[in-house]
Amino acid sequence: MSRDLATRPASAADLSEAEAFLAAHPEITAFDLVLIDLNGIARGKIIRRHELLPIFRSGRHLPGSILGLDVTGEDVEETGLVWSDGDADRRAWPIAGSLVPLPWTSPPRGEVRLALYELDGTPMDADPRHALARQVGLLEADGFHPVLAYELEFYLLDRERTPDGNFQPLRLPLTGERPDGIQVYGVSELDRLEPFIDAVYRGAEAQGLPVETMISEYAQGQFELTLRHGSALRAADDLAMLKRLIRALAVRHGMMACFMAKPFAGRAGSGMHVHASLGAAAGENLFADHGEALSPLLRNAVAGLLETMEESMLVFAPHFNSWRRFSAQSYAPTTPTWGTNNRSVAVRIPAGSPAGRHLEQRAAGIDSNPYLVGATVLAGMRKGILAKADPGPETTTYAEGSGDTLPPDWRGAIETASRSVFLREALGERLHHVFLALKRAEYCRFANEVTALERTFYGEIV
């Protein structure tokens, strides 16, 4: 047996997937190789058509430092993945089911997403997708099959900024006008966005993305897309691919898709709510109601999420801007609370069919990494289930959940995460170290910047 075959991971996509795709798409001459880093940013290369089959046979070498980059794409030596590691190569392998056309490209290209492995075929433990896969495996060993669905909130903005450099809402394609007022659930705004929405749905269909409802959200130019639930890994894959699809289509429609958690000070932030349930091997929902009462297993999972929320906040709010999203009566939770049919809480039990009961974790912003969020949510649920924890009484109003029980800011979240045994176990020792090194480097960049507001306030006053 050759070395390549001996070190091929069992989860890597089969060669037949690439052969069938090439036969069905003779028009595609190039492919994007895409790996999602710890900041949720797509990294990779563009290859020619003849290079695809060798990657499915033998993988493709990529430097491990690709997972040690900050949001600007600069190496962070403190991750241990750059010069202290010799900038060593690992091997990237295609993810099964990820080979798709890129419907926005001309000439047409395809895309295949990658996961990173050591040369001996073991998972490279700084790859965030492996962290989620590990939590899925732990739950499956306990007899549970996790099901996730992500909501995607985002802004569509004009590519032209204001004279002072600020963002401004898009011009709606059919009228050329900017949205007027909040218009939450407004249908007219969606109708006037028709060319873009149609392109999103057609692109999602071409890529096999289970995109469902489009909503005009709680600010000018803010929208939401929902994804149908699925297996935990596939759900995170879908979210990562959908962000890439929306961003690419927005550019081609003269707009900018913005996935900042809080692009405007006086307007709603953008969340990435995670809907979760656990299934049995036969497929039944283990979170389904027990008569008139919530499932004990669901209550255990909620309790685990509340108990671990403080330690998890750096994953849910990983950037400086992320922390601007949290404020009272803002639909972004500020305390670890839970409730039924209540959007002010951190963990919500949505109204709906008792047989389809599930929980919704509302803390994560759309700027967070879906694999890290998924891994942390599943680890928190599992912790509560194993301990048979009780979440306590539910919250029915925002006031009942008041209190300073979460890190007050980004720096506090970094320090809390650094001390967290739970987060270290949820992400894995190495990924925990790399993630914290990236966040500390990013924090230092902002801490060292003297802002225009500082110059205005203090320049001639103090």
Image (tube, rainbow, N blue to C red):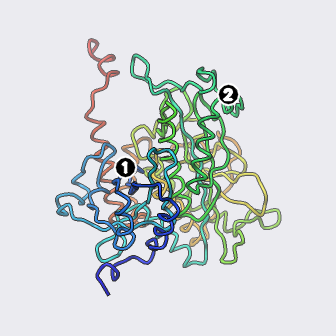
In the image, farthest residue toward the right: 291
**Residue located at (59% from left, 41% from top):** 199
Q: Which residue is mark 1?
A: 414
Give residue 183's mark: 2
Amino acid carrying label 2: it is Gln
Q: Quadrant of the C terminus?
A: top left
Closest to the camera, between mark 1 and mark 2, is 2
Amino acid carrying label 1: it is Ile
How crowded pointer 2 is (Cα within 10 Å; few <14, some 14-19, many 20+) is rated as some
How crowded pointer 1 is (Cα within 10 Å; few <14, some 14-19, many 20+) is rated as many
N-terminal label among 1 and 2 = 2
283 relative to 158 in the view: left or right? right
Label 1: element kind: helix
Q: Position of residue 338 (x, y in %)?
A: 64, 52
**Residue located at (44% from left, 19% from top):** 162
**Residue located at (57% from left, 72% from top):** 386
318 relative to 430 in the view: left or right? right
